[in-house]
Amino acid sequence: MKHIATLIAAAMILCAGIGAAQAEEKVLMMATTTSTDNTGLLPVLEQAFKKDTGIELRWLAVGTGKALELGKNCDVDVLLVHAPKAEKEFVEAGHGLGRTEVMFNDFVLLGPKNDPAKVKGKTTSEALRAIAAAKSPFISRGDDSGTHKMELALWKAADMAAPDKETWYVQAGQGMMATIVMAAERSGYTLTDRATFFTYEAKGDPALAVLVEGDKPLLNQYSVIVINPEKCKNAKVNLAKAFNDWLASPKGQQVVADFKSDGKQLFTPNAKK
């Protein structure tokens, strides 16, 4: 009897171990941007994805540059990022299986409501040149995020190098919401994605306003990248593909479309059908 009891106990432990391993396999680790986190989109995606697939989504919210590094270092299984040029280089280097465009919003230039550099209504290039000429405070993310990469590209498009040696140009080295708060405290200008601005604005009586918007270069595209298992042998490629396919599916796209703050749509789904 003791022998039988021992066998039964061993079998129960084995089954428990198998169950735990299976549960562990259903956890997907993602690196993504602070903008998707600040807006509250991620918990909504996580709940809907788990309901439809049974897969638990966990994430690290960092700048896109850091997210890509986490992917290269095999620390995550999938990415949700917004720096197309860097993403394409990442995939071309073999770190990702491809990129699937899933949603977009746009970048906007924020500044004090009294607009000391007089940028309202200008193109982005004209606005940046005006800020530089006026030496008005400009608060940069300064963190290699997708927003920071976009800002650097915009300075270049304005035929200027990023003025990182100038005293009026401040590199925050922080996430988007913290950078907006710093710009407000210093009565400065900053570049942000519109979704994070809506979240900031919803807090009431914002010190900053959208002064430049709608310029073609300000499109902010988000894409999913599945980590290449040939580079990262422990990457959960099947779970990552499941997330990629779900977010690009009509169900996932509807979750994005339905996500709003104070009635304002923060992201527009645009996965190819």
Image (cartoon, rainbow, N blue to C red):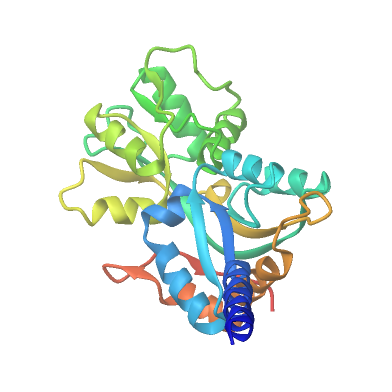
Asked if one can make out residue 216 in the rendered structure from this viewpoint, the answer is yes
Q: Residue at x 70, y 69 (%)?
A: 241
Total numbered labels:
0
Residue 129 in the image: x percent, y percent? 47, 25
Q: Would you place residue 194 above or below residue 246 in this image?
A: above
Q: Residue at x 82, y 47 (%)?
A: 92
Q: Residue furthest front?
A: 1
Image quadrant in which the C terminus is located: bottom right
Q: Residue at x 43, y 49 (%)?
A: 213
Residue 237 in the image: x percent, y percent? 73, 64
On the rendered structure, is 107 left or right of 156?
A: left
Q: Nearer the viewer, residue 14 or 140?
A: 14
Residue 156, by quadrant, is top right
Residue 43, by quadrant, is bottom left
Q: Nearer the viewer, residue 204 or 143?
A: 143
Q: Residue at x 58, y 39 (%)?
A: 66
Residue 68, by quadrant, is top right
On the rendered structure, is 258 left or right of 159?
A: left
Q: Would you place residue 115 above or below residue 101 in this image?
A: above
Asked if one can make out residue 214 in the rendered structure from this viewpoint, the answer is no
Image quadrant in which the N terminus is located: bottom right
Residue 192 in the image: x percent, y percent? 42, 44
